[in-house]
Amino acid sequence: MKKNALTLVVAAVLLVIFVLLLFTFQVRQSEVVVVSTFLKPTDTITNAGLYVKWPWPVQSINRFDQRVQTFADIPSETPTADSTMLFVNVFVGWKISDAREFLPKFRGGSTADAQRYLENMLRSAKAAVIGKHNFADFVNSDPAELKFDEIEKEIQASVEKELTRNNYGISIEFLGIKKLELPQSVTQSVFDRMKAERTKLISKAQFEGEAEATKIKSSAERQAADLLANAQADATRIEGEGKAEAAKTLPVFQQNPELAVFQLELEALKSSMNQKTTLFFDETKPPFDVFRKLSPSPVAPSSETK
Amino acid sequence: MSDHDHHDHSHAPETRDAGSQALSEALRSSFFVVKIAMAALVVIILGAGIFTVNPGEKAVILRFGRPVGEGQKMLLSSGKIYWSFPYPIDEVVRIPITEIQKVTSSVGWYLTTPEMELAGTAPPAGPSLDPAIDGYVITADRNIIHTRAIVSYHIDDPLTAIFDFASGTNHQFNLAGISNAVQNAANNALVATAARFNVDDILTRDLAGFQDAVGQRVNELVEQEHLGVVVDNCQVQSVAPRQLKDVFDQVTTARQNRDKVYSEALGEQNRILSQAGAAAQSITNAAESARVRYVSSVESDAEVFTNLLPRYESNPQLYVQLELARAMAEVLTNAGEKKVLPASSDGKSIELRLMLNNEPPQPNSGANK
């Protein structure tokens, strides 16, 4: 009895597993599943979990990764509106937005096929958009003139329009320019121009240094002269202020101007004499006329006092 | 017949009993082994479901493909022991989050090898750049430079990173999809930012500004594309084309020389202005001192005058004579040389002639030869 029970349990487990395999399927978090009944898509499951289905050939399932997939197209040489040839390489983030529409459009729902279609669409959209813009729209130091972001948006809008028109079940999540380059032959001439510009910059730097230094020095000398002139003006003003202040004592001297002048002359006389001064005196004038008064004969011409 | 049957029947049960017993024993022992094996298998299967989460990573259990738990609760952290059903019921997805991820831009730099990078060398430069091999960017002033970015980031939203971005067509859960998206963001940021910066700004004048602008665009793209990562750092390296390295170096040298001359001129300017400032201050100080001295002197003269006035007024002539005599004595004492000129025989003063100018310089004798 026990043996039969064990056998039954094992058989039941195996049967359950077999039935589960036949009648159920999982949808992972990152997947979307299209259920087809007699090969005709009848249901789309986007939520993860365990689901029931009729076994093949009644129902079959197709799984798709519903996450964002990125790829970059092959760079292609495209002319701008002003006939500048550019190599533009674009990256795209896309995802399956409607798996039921996606499945029949591409062979077996192949994402590789879908990517190839996208690349073709992208090439056309790129050429159309780039052809509408001048090279200055791609590279420009003036933010108002630069249209880099607008160009990316235009390419994305063009691809999205095409996808919507054909109802491919694909959505573009993001798109951006990955490479922006020039044809190989053009790089040579760009290098020549850059070299010429650098040479000019070398001369300019040399000239600028000397010119700027001269300007700075002359400016400094002018400022220094201004400073000194202002200082002299201040000094004159201060001197005037001193005289004005001193003039307040004028009434004192006005009591006897003769005495005042006499006193000033004496002070001037005293302060003008120093050790290096040589004085010549006439012996006929005081106080040296004293000598003449002492002796009846005149003093010898060569006499001198030290 | 009956005897025979009886005889046969008397032996057959014994034989069957022995055989049945042996078979029963064998089956019993076999079933016992099977039971043990099944029990062991169950234990192994259950035990295999035990797992831990490493530090620096999060884990999610997918049960029949659906994450177990809601919101952030579905993220399992380190420090605990977890259990999951065996595959295909459960699937444990591990996501490194705190580990800093690094991605280097794949455009903008010339073709090189890791060995050359380590040695600090570059491949020989041809006369031009092949877009299929050599990467570069075009600047706003239509020059060509090489530039590359290294973006360091960490996973901020593990569920987005794993469940929203594919790494290919194999349905695997890993971070390759996010890494690819961040790399594309870095590539785009380099090309788009270089397109609005001039070459000299990128290479010399505004290195930090260019790097910041690239980092800012990477951040913007990461947010716009909802990548679920946080950019920690974006380092940018830019160089002039190898074909023009010499001439770019010469410009740098010329500019350094210009800056040196400019700096020296500024130093000279400071010196001149400092000296002038000091001289100006000295002039005003001297004037101020002179003013104070002058006023003080006049005031003291006035005081002296006031004191002398009564004496003068009492006998002006005598006062003048006395003061003159005193002054003469003082002058004669201080003067270095005093010469008294005698009167001529007719009693008149003799005429004295003084040569006030210096003698003219003598011609150099050597120059005449």
Image (cartoon, grey):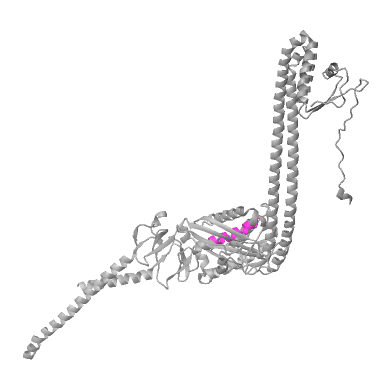
Q: Residue at x 77, y 23 (%)?
A: B331
Task: State left or right for residue B42 relative to residue A273.
Answer: left
Give me the residue at 69% from left, 30% from top. B285
The secondary structure that most of the magenta stretch takes on is helix
Q: Does residue A115 lie above or below B305 as drawn?
A: below
Residue depicted at x 62% and y 54%:
B207
Q: Quadrant of residue A255?
A: top right
Image spot of residue B322 (x, y percent) = 77, 14
Residue at 77% from the left image edge and 9% from the top image edge: B313
Residue B140 appears in the rendering: no
Q: Nearer the viewer, residue A177 or A219?
A: A219
Q: Nearer the viewer, residue B64 or B119?
A: B119
Q: Where residue B162 sits in the image (x, y, percent)? A: 46, 61
Indicate yes or no whether the magenta region holds residue B241: no
Quadrant where the N terminus of chain B sits is bottom left
- Say how many tags the image has: 0
Q: Which residues are the magenta region? A: B182-197
Left or right: residue B283 compared with residue B224: right
Q: Is residue B49 left or right of residue B201?
A: left
**Residue B274 horizontal/vertical position (percent):** 69, 39
Q: Quadrant of residue B76?
A: bottom left
